[in-house]
Image (spheres, rainbow, N blue to C red):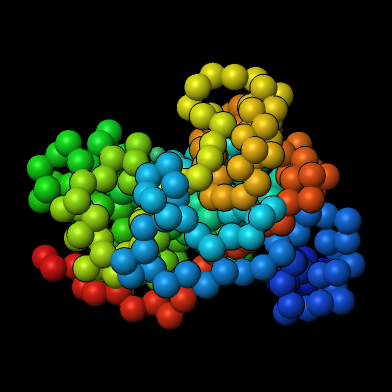
């Protein structure tokens, strides 16, 4: 690896954090940046007011950026490039079979310092409508596919025990299973509804209107959507101009129970 490349990689990982403050400050000057890292105790966690009564403890103006359904060639790269330019870290809830098909992208997400959470193996709509055992099997297969793709190996103890239900389709029984497994469940507080076709400009206007109304929260996007990938650069600039701060969520002291079967 050339010294220049090493330097660039180190810079990327240090951006917005304290590993190399002088370096990071220089390269991230005038950028949105990541304002703080929030360590999240995953076991029993259920957050996101679109799905649950409570959410993360965010101050006014603080947002957590999340991207579902990837990785996806083309669009995920665009999103990663935009996040890197603005020195911002996000959380990607990966679909197991997509991660298995594109392990290079899963590894790139990890290498660039983002958090990799889980979003099932096959993205059933919904897990709550399936027999419980089948739903659990899909969730567990997703855990191992994503971890193998992102880190090269999988073990019962998850590196990042964060899960989001496809279509927010949870059931009390599945929520109980994940709580016992030590896995935190993330909903969201707002979105632009990027599964609906709209132009990047329309999407930007919509999400900023909603954010300016709610003032904080976990924001849900899909890095598989071209309209979203095109919108993200302008969205990050808008966050900076409107005075928002990006919070990066990471798991605190990971202790997860083994899969029961
Ligand atoms: Zn999804």
Q: Is residue 218 above or below residue 75?
A: below
Q: Could you tell me which residue is drawn at 15 percent across and 39 percent down?
A: 130
Q: Quadrant of residue 179?
A: bottom left
**Image coords of residue 191 (percent x, y):** 54, 36
**Image coords of residue 98 (percent x, y):** 40, 44
Horizontal placement of 164 versus 68: left or right? left
Horizontal placement of 199 versus 141: left or right? right
Ligand 1 visible in quadrant: top left
Q: Quadrant of residue 197?
A: top right
Residue 258 appears anywhere in the view: yes
Q: Is residue 33 above or below residue 101?
A: below
Q: Could you tell me which residue is drawn at 33 percent across and 70 percent down?
A: 43
**Image coords of residue 245 (percent x, y):** 71, 56
Q: Could you tell me which residue is drawn at 39 percent across and 60 percent down?
A: 162
**Image coords of residue 249 (percent x, y):** 54, 64
Horizontal placement of 184 versus 28: left or right? left
Q: Could you tell me which residue is drawn at 24 percent across and 55 percent down?
A: 175
- For the image, the number of numbered tags is 0
Residue 85 appears anywhere in the view: no
């Amino acid at each position: 690896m050339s010294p220049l490349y090493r330097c660039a990689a180190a810079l990327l990982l240090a951006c917005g954090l304290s590993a190399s403050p002088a370096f990071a400050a220089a390269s991230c000057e005038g950028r949105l940046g990541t304002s703080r890292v929030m360590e999240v105790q995953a076991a029993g966690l259920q957050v996101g007011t679109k799905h649950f009564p409570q959410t993360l403890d965010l101050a006014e103006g603080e947002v957590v950026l999340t991207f579902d359904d990837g990785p996806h060639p083309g669009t995920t790269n665009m999103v990663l490039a935009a996040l890197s330019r603005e020195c911002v870290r996000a959380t990607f809830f990966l679909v197991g079979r997509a991660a298995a098909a594109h392990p290079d992208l899963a590894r790139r997400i990890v290498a660039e310092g983002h958090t990799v959470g889980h979003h099932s193996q096959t993205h059933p709509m919904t897990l709550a409508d399936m027999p419980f055992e089948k739903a659990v099997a899909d969730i567990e297969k997703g855990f191992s596919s994503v971890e193998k793709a992102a880190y090269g190996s999988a073990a019962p103890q998850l590196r990042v025990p964060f899960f989001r239900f496809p279509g927010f389709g949870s059931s009390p029984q599945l929520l109980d299973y994940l709580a016992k497994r030590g896995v935190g469940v993330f909903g969201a507080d707002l979105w632009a509804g990027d599964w609906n076709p709209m132009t990047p400009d329309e999407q930007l206007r919509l999400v900023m209107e909603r954010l300016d109304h709610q003032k904080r929260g976990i924001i849900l996007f899909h890095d598989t959507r071209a309209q979203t990938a095109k919108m993200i650069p302008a969205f990050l600039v808008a966050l900076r101009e409107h005075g928002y701060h990006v919070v990066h969520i990471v798991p605190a002291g990971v202790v997860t129970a083994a899969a029961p079967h």
